[in-house]
Amino acid sequence: MENKTAFNFKEIQSRPERLAPGHRMCAGCGGTIAVRNVLKALHPGDKAVIGNATGCLEVSSFTYPYTSYEDSYIHSAFENAGATLSGVETAYIALKKKGKIKDNYKFITFGGDGGTYDIGLQSLSGAMERGHDMVYVCYDNGAYMNTGIQRSSATPMFADTTTTPAGSVSNGKPQSRKDLVAIMAAHHIPYTAQTTFIGNMKDLYVKAEKAIYTQGPAFLNIMAPCPRGWRFDAADTVDICKLAVETCYWPMYEVVDGKWILNYEPKKKLPVEDFLIKQGRFKHLFKTGNEYLIEQFQAEVDRRWEELKNKCNA
Amino acid sequence: MAIKERMSGNEAVAFAIKQVNPDVMPAFPITPSTELPQFVSNYVANGKIDTEFIPVESEHSSMSAAMGASAAGARALTATSSCGLALMWEMLYVAASSRLPIALALVNRGLTGPLNINCEHSDSMGARDSGWLQVYAENNQEAYDNFIMAYRVAEHKDVRLPIMTCMDGFITSHAVENITLIEDDLVKKFVGEYEPEHYLLNEEEPMAVGPYAVSNYCMEAKRAQAQGMMNAKQVFLDVAKEFEQISGRKYGLFEEYKLDDAEYAVVGIGSAMGTAKDAIDALRAKGIKAGLLKVRVFRPFPGEEMAAALAGCKAIAIMDRCESYSGNGGPLGAELTSALYRAKSKAEIINVVYGLSGRDVKVEDFENLYGELADIAVNGVKDTQYRYLGLRE
């Protein structure tokens, strides 16, 4: 089921940038695309406080004395983006109650998969469970990229990372990915969604807007390819996203008030190797004799896809 | 008119919190500070306080949320003890370096190993270099007074640092004693409204907090932070002077008890110093010139002032309710000895570790200690300079 929310591409893209150019993120960085487009979903006139876990985004977008954010922004540490922004949001309630603030503020925090799936999971869970009116956005690039491509619990199976290197007796990461979106949905928050960069970014925009303007906590998981860590040409970011979706490796869906909704179903599901072959981190899977690894990867994608479809058809 | 009451230390600090009426309190329970979030939650549940209470899932998150709230422009506080403070460790430094005037009501308890819930200063002493102001109480009255003064120091434009108000676990936090409270309106007027210059929710001007800073900038930021700490000494004194006008109670950076003409001095922190005072009274009755320097403000460390106050003493016992595992004494011992050296003190000095994990310290212990000091004054330090009191052999 596609999202039907009004989407005027021209109007939205003509909105002033809230992430100013001049930051130091890499060319082709998915994290930057995620932030720019999520912030586009803020209605003009609304103010926001942006939070951020330590990571590539933070060190590259707020390097003293320059900030790339047009809005107020806070970073405090790696594992506490949820808790930190929950404090900001609570201060807003307290100060609004006292009549010290008149404007409307929205609260959006960004973390990579390291700060979200792993070290920051407790802080995120706490903030979501307590019901703060905020959005947590995970830009999921599937490894600890800021420290140099170490595996995370979001790293796909068999990926070659610096802590799960493919070697003579290793096929890369042995485990498959943690299903964080399901964990967030299990918090029974009003809005959880997964998306990435497809076409004119409509899906991302619609989900970001819903997340921001739904009362209460919302979680957005955005696949944000990292050319450096995934080993692909920086010009191919959007193609990689398309392949991730068309192979059903990265399904686009949302959980609205407990209802699971599949937003896109490929007419013809592509084999997962079409997605894998584009990335150097899976190069070892294409060596003669390793075909069974791709089969295992495919089986895991199929299993999860069927499981998701069942949830969405229930 | 001041209000006469009977309260435990935790009740007294909770009452101070109610009177100060801060904006946001994230907290997570841990013995012996658990009552503080409980009291505040009760105030909230009964509409007696405007504070927004955040029942966070850990102390790391309570400090993180307090930081977020404070940066947003709210007056924020939390409370904790022991392992809870240890879990906040990382964020203590971030809060201080972000120059956020958060208050933390600390109920001192030892850090684990073995697990123990009783009084010791190893928690706050471990955090002594985190950039927080630290002020210690001997009893419930001081715990109450210190909290009422806390934001005035922390928020002062020359300081802008978070503040830890410390009291002894159980001994002070749970023992009920007489106390004199100040009227609500006087407290409200004394503490005033929090009007930060820069904050996240400033509608006129956005702000960014928590940058990545390269070596070209970091060192200057740290030096500026250290200046705030140095400036705090005078601010503590100024605020205490104003506080005296509404309370009649006088506070300095430390308290001198019969120290003017003392030949033998004990220097220490917290509730055991009340016990030392009893010993001093008994010894003075026998003509022995015993005195006490009780540390109130530990950060900033008033080394020069303490050395000057101890100038006339022949022998000094510096007491640490904390083992620092340096193999060379406790934190107060190390810092004060250094200050005495710089002041060219000729006094004999011993560093006494006592009261760990709630080990009781009695009037007789102090009497014996003063006897030892009298001997040391004549014969010098014969035993080790760093020693334990009340250790079972």
Image (cartoon, grey):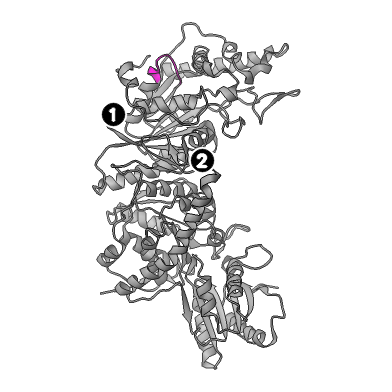
Q: Position of residue A293 (x, y in %)?
A: 66, 16
Boundaries of the magenta span? A196-203
Residue under the image location 57 percent in, 26 percent down: A177
Q: Position of residue A214 (x, y in %)?
A: 32, 30
Find residue B36 and report its image quarter: bottom left
Q: Is residue A101 magenta?
A: no
- Which image quarter is the C terminus of chain B in? bottom right
Using the image, tell me which numbered label, if any, was put on residue A79: 2
Bin the neighbour count of mark 1 within 10 Å (Cα to Cα): few under 14, some 14-19, many 20 and up: few
Q: Chain of mark 1?
A: A
B286 up-or-down from B27: above or below: below
Residue linked to disc 1: A44
Residue under the image location 60 percent in, 21 percent down: A231
Q: Earlier in the sequence, mark 2 or mark 1?
A: 1
Tell me the kind of residue under disc 1: Pro
Q: Position of residue A176 (x, y in %)?
A: 60, 24
